[in-house]
Image (cartoon, rainbow, N blue to C red):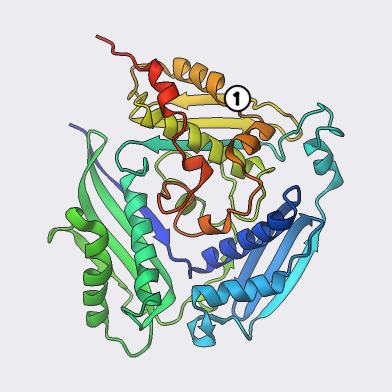
């Protein structure tokens, strides 16, 4: 009997890195809203009283970048410099250039070497799905995201008025034979006003955040650690610099399954770091939902300017009645992994990205995301077999 513990973390929308992810994706959405063929690769950096926007953007539309920065900070809740940054008084520095013409040529099917849309960069991307939650996601990251989202909810709706925007969660789940059997530990870090006692904060977090999120998983044996330094008043960019793309494991599967290393936020769908990973998730989720595997990881790789994926690999971790080679053959037959095919099939030229920049890009049943749809399940069920 195989037992182990697995841990995943999440961060709130007010975490400095997540501030940057949201700003980058809101700039991307602003480009795509009026210029679906525009190209954006936008980075953000924030520290005490400062937000810096850099990167490459080629577009025919006007993007009010400074306005987006301040509006995003305000929506998150950074309305007072004591919280870590203030949307009205912070400085905004913009350093934007156009996309390299060499890269643009490789992505243009008329001008490119292969007369088809080439990949926007080289690299490998992974997608993952499992059947241990309704979201087809690992339980640790699912609960961790729900905890941080709940922290933001009770702060914004006034239930816990003393909370400030920054925060984190971490959940450790016990597994037996690769199935979750219970929650072992919950860690929460919640930024707060100066005048709230730690004892009251802990009681409030347990009653208003942890218990509602864990539901049936909650019991008195769970180890709960809340603000273990004793104080979390100073937070946000004043306490910790933020950077786009620094929470790639938070954004994906919480460490369950591998990662190719490329972040998502600020990158348009012409960049395979984003669109390739979305496609791999879409395929893995549909195969698992169809019953072809209990767990499935897919790797895909690309060369810049080249229109076909260099490799596609399936790994079912021994949970399928089909071999991994058979699963790969099914994937190649039913899914188009070319850059243009991904964009067309998932309809990725729309301004849909800012909503993914907090609380995960996958397993978001609260959002209508094209890579989360299960439209291939019935078609794939024909491959279900029973081996004696």
Q: Residue furthest left?
A: 220
Q: Which residue is mark 1?
A: 311
- Tell me residue 373's x, y (percent): 46, 39
Q: Nearer the viewer, residue 50 or 58?
A: 58
Q: Nearer the viewer, residue 95 or 107?
A: 107
Query: In the rendered image, which quarter is residue 150 located in?
Result: bottom left
Residue drawn where x is 27% and y is 60% of the image? 213
Residue 7 in view: no
- Tell me residue 149's x, y (percent): 39, 63
Image quarter of the N terminus: top left
- Tell me residue 209's x, y (percent): 28, 67
Query: In the rendered image, which quarter is residue 211 located in?
Result: bottom left
- Tell me residue 293's x, y (percent): 36, 26
Q: Is residue 135 above or below residue 53?
A: above
Q: Specify whether 158 is left or right of 311.
A: left
Q: Nearer the viewer, residue 161 or 176?
A: 161
Q: Specify whether 108 is left or right of 177.
A: right
């Amino acid at each position: 009997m195989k037992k182990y513990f697995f841990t995943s973390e999440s961060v709130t929308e007010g975490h400095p890195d997540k501030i940057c992810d949201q700003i980058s994706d809101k700039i991307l959405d602003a480009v795509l809203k009026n210029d679906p063929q525009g190209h954006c690769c936008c980075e953000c950096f924030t520290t005490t009283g400062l937000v810096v926007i850099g990167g490459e953007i080629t577009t025919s539309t006007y993007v009010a970048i400074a306005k987006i920065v301040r509006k995003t900070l305000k929506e998150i809740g950074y309305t007072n410099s004591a919280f870590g940054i203030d949307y009205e008084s912070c400085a905004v520095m913009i350093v934007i250039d156009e996309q390299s013409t060499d890269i643009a040529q490789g992505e243009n099917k008329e001008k490119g070497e292969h007369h088809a849309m080439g990949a926007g960069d080289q690299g490998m991307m992974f997608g993952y799905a499992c059947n241990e939650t309704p979201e087809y996601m690992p339980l640790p990251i699912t609960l961790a995201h729900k905890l941080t989202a709940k922290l933001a909810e009770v702060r914004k709706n006034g239930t816990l008025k003393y909370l400030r925007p920054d925060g984190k969660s971490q959940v450790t789940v016990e597994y037996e034979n690769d199935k979750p059997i219970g929650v072992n530990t919950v860690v929460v870090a919640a930024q707060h006003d100066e005048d709230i006692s730690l004892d009251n904060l802990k009681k409030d977090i347990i009653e208003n955040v942890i218990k509602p999120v864990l539901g049936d998983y909650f019991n008195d044996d769970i180890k709960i650690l809340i603000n273990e330094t004793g104080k979390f008043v100073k937070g946000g960019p004043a306490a910790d610099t933020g950077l786009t793309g620094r929470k790639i494991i938070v954004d994906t599967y919480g460490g369950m399954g591998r990662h190719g290393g490329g972040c998502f936020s600020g990158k348009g769908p012409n960049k395979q770091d984003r669109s390739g990973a979305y496609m791999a998730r879409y395929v893995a989720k549909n195969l698992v939902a169809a019953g072809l595997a209990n767990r499935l990881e897919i790797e895909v790789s690309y060369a810049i300017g080249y229109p076909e994926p260099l490799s596609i690999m399936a790994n079912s971790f021994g949970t399928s009645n089909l071999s991994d080679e058979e699963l790969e053959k099914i994937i190649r037959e039913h899914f188009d992994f070319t850059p243009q095919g991904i964009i067309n099939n998932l309809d990725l030229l729309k301004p849909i990205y800012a909503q993914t920049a907090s609380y995960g890009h996958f397993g978001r049943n609260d959002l209508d995301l094209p890579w989360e749809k299960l439209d291939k399940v019935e078609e794939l069920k024909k491959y279900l077999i029973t081996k004696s």
